[in-house]
Image: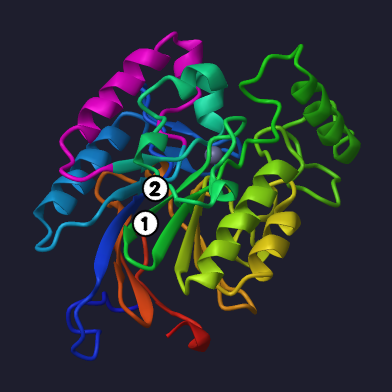
Amino acid sequence: MAEKLNPDTQTDGSEHLFSFGVIADIQYADLEDGYNFRGNRRRYYRHSLLHLQGAIEDWNKEGSMPCCVLQLGDIIDGYNAQHRASEASLERVMNTFHMLKVPVHHTWGNHEFYNFSRDFLTNSKLNTKFLEDRIVHHPETMPSESYYAYHFVPFPTFRFILLDAYDLSVLGIDQSSPKYQQCMKMLREHNPNVELNSPQGLCEPQFVQFNGGFSQEQLNWLNEVLTFSDTNQEKVVIVSHLPIYPEASDSVCLAWNYTDALAVIWSHKCVVCFLAGHTHDGGYSEDPFGVHHVNLEGVIETAPDSQAFGTVYVYPDKMILKGRGRVPDRIMNFKKEHF
Ligand SMILES: [Zn+2]
C-alpha cells in the first residue's frame, strides 16, 4: 500500500493553482445492502448517502476550498424506479449536496436513465449546464441541445469538458424515436445476445445495453473545443460517466465507440486527464499520448468503515489526486510540451 501523499509537501515548494473534488457512483437507494449482478461485491445502498455527507464535510473543511466538485454519474440506483422512489431519492441526495459550499457539476450515467427520461433530466437539478463558460466569437464551441455536454474554465488556461456518454444509447429515450431505432440497430449489430446487458461471447464486450456512446455530432463539437484549447495553450480535463481507455478499465465498462473518442483526443495536445466512473473497482493508466485516465472507485461498493472520493490539486506541471479511503493517491505529470 503506497503511503498517502501530502499535497502540500509533494510540490517542490510550489503552491497548487486550484483544486477540485471528485466522487462517483453514489447509487443511493433507501434499501438494505445488496450485491452486484455477479454477486461478488456488496452494495451499501443506504450508507452511500452517509459517504456523500462525509465527503462534503471534508471538502467544506479544506484550507483552500476546491473550485468545484465533479459528480461522475449514477447518483441514485436503478432500484429506485422499481420502488417508485426515484424523485424522493434524488431529492434526498440533492439536499445533501446543498451542504456543499462550492458548485457541483453533474454527469449522467446509466442509472440516471433507469430512473428518468432524458427530458426529465434536462429539466432537473442534475442539469448543470448553466455552469458552462462560453467562448465569445467561437460559435463552433457551443454544444448542441441534442446531447448533455458543456465546457467550463475553473482557472485560467484550464478547461474542463463534460461529455455525454449516453448520447448514443437505448436508455431514457422514446422507443418510437428515430435515434432509438438507430441506437438499437447499432447495439444489435454488435450484440446478438437475447439479453442485451450480457457481454457473453462478444469480441467487443462494451456493446451492452448498460453502456452508450458518443454521436459524431458530439465528437465534432469536442474536436472544435480541443482545437480552440490547443490554439490557446490550455490544458483540458475531460469528464464522462463511461471510461474510454482499455488499459484503465474492464472492457465491459467502456463506451461503445471509445476508439472514436480516443482518436479525437489523441489528435490534440491539450488533453491531460480523462475522469470516469461506472467501473466501481477503479482503475488508472497513462496512455502513450500522456493522457491520464482515472476511473474513480464507486461509493456504492464502499464499506461503511471506508470512504471513496478525492480532491485533485492542480499545479503548473502536474495534478495530484489525493484519494480518501479506497481511492489511491496518484501523481499525474503533464507531458513536457505542456509546461
Ligand atoms: Zn454506470
Residue 91 belongs to the span the image colors magenta: yes
Q: State left or right for residue 296 relative to residue 109.
A: left
Q: Residue sitting at 26 percent across and 74 percent down?
A: 4
Q: Residue furthest top?
A: 84
Query: Which quadrant holds the N terminus?
Result: bottom left
Q: In the image, residue 196 lies at what x, y percent? A: 77, 30
Q: State left or right for residue 231 relative to residue 328.
A: right
Q: Which residue is mark 2?
A: 133
Q: Residue sitting at 38 percent across and 79 percent down?
A: 318
Colour theme: rainbow
Q: Residue sitting at 21 percent across and 85 percent down?
A: 14
* Amino acid type, residue under disc 1 in the picture: Val
Q: Which residues are magenta?
A: 74-103
* Amino acid type, residue under disc 2 in the picture: Asp
Q: State left or right for residue 287 relative to residue 99.
A: right
Q: State left or right for residue 43 relative to residue 175.
A: left
User: Up-down: is 65 above or below 6?
Assistant: above
Ligand 1: which quarter? top right
Q: Which residue is mark 1?
A: 153
User: Up-down: is 114 above or below 208?
Assistant: above
Q: In the image, residue 249 lies at what x, y percent? A: 61, 59
Q: In the image, residue 90 lies at what x, y percent? A: 35, 22
Query: Which quadrant holds the C terminus?
Result: bottom left
Q: Tell me, yes or no, if residue 30 can be seen here.
A: no
Nearest to N terminus: mark 2 or mark 1: 2
Query: Which of the two residues, 42 or 203, is positioned nearer the viewer here?
Result: 203
SS at badge 2: loop
Q: Residue sitting at 19 percent across and 32 percent down?
A: 98
